[in-house]
Amino acid sequence: MAYFTICIPVYNRKDTIIRTLSSIMTQNFQSYEVIIVDDGSTDGTDIVVKQYLDEKEDDRYIYIYKENGGKHSALNVGIRNATGKFFLILDSDDWFVENALNSLYSHCVEIENDDTCCGIMGRTINSDTGEIIGDLFDLNNPVSSYFEYHFILPQKMYVQDCYEAVKVSILKQYSYPEQKGMRFVPEAYIFDKIGIKYTLILTNDVFRITEYREDGMTLDKDFKKKNVVGYLYHYISRIEDVIIPRKMPAFLKIKLLILSWWRYWQCVNIDTKQQGPRIERITIMGHIVRIVTPIINKIFEKKYPQYVR
């Protein structure tokens, strides 16, 4: 059994995919498998990948071509086919730093038999600046969770684009929703749920380098509008499956529910064709937030414009 399953979801990245694959080939740590899930590329990515793999003749690399369904659907394929102990997602325009897998292994081996822990989270470098993205973790308390990472830490520090290794056995308990015409579901859809059951170990070790491309998700200001259906699934799940069942102080729960309801109503207003899901039973808080959403929008447009887009 391979120790790591490295999943590479790819769509129209013939110009960067070899850099990604080469960063794996040059790793000293060798116990891994690579699952390349081509999400219906039309630019010749398949030709580039197949030629590269034919030259290397390494049966640890598996190439799977599927109809275009969005990155989340490609991850579903990767998770279903994974046979390793820990699952790594490496985007097709990102690449590993030297000895990343050795470093990841040194952390993962410490928690592989801990049934309360899902994995480890480390850091990423911005290729443009050469600097670590976000503030460093406080390692005086390295035990965290995806719940804390998504809901608590952002209130204390700037966190973005960290890099994780997650146990395959846990990931296989979850999947992303798939609906015809839906092209994106936030990765947090799964990891939020994992975060209410399992811990996560933090480290400031760097594992990955990422490149922010003009045609990528991160720099697309209209990305949420284009993918409102997937975001509706995400926010409904946060309300019903994550925040409500999670034990936490009442004030924090109310605060997170208000924020999630607000985001939900934002998406409902965008989804004028009613293509996405809806919450069947609206709570009193949900109704109140809907009424005051225009007021919240005005407040956030001035103070926190990044939350409104």
Image: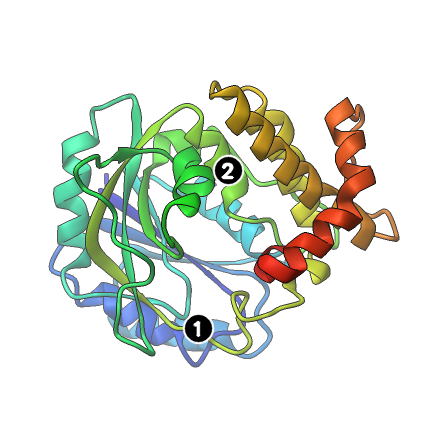
The local secondary structure at tag 2 comes to helix
Q: Which residue is mark 2?
A: 190
Q: Residue at x 75, y 30 (%)?
A: 286
Identified by mark 2, the residue type is: Ile
Q: Amino acid at mark 1?
A: Tyr
| Residue occupying image coordinates x 16% and y 62% | 27
Q: CA distance from mark 1 to mark 2?
A: 24 Å
Residue in view at x 13 percent, y 52 percent: 102
Q: Nearer the viewer, mark 1 or mark 2?
A: 1
Q: Is residue 263 left or right of residue 63?
A: right
Is residue 282 depicted above or below 138 in this figure?
A: above
Q: Answer whether residue 278 is visible to the viewer in this image.
A: yes
Q: 77 or 99: which is nearer to us?
A: 99
Residue 217 screen position, x and y as percent: 55, 65
Looking at the rendering, which quadrant does residue 53 occupy?
bottom left
40 over 186 or under it: above or below: below
| Whole-percent x, y for residue 54 in the image | 33, 71
Compared with 107, 163 (above or below) is below
Instruction: Give the quarter of the figure containing the N terminus.
Output: top left
Q: Secondary structure at mark 1?
A: loop
- Please give left or right for residue 305 compared with residue 37 in the image: right
Residue that appears at 17% across and 67% down:
26
Nearer-N-terminus badge (1/2): 2
Residue highlighted by disc 1: 212
Report the side of 112 relative to 102 (left or right).
Answer: right
Q: Quadrant of residue 98?
A: bottom left
Residue 45 drawn at (x, y percent): 49, 74
Of 127 and 171, the residue lying toward us: 127
Q: Nearer the viewer, residue 269 or 273?
A: 269
Residue 121 point in image, percent of width and height = 29, 45
Q: Does the image show residue 182?
A: no
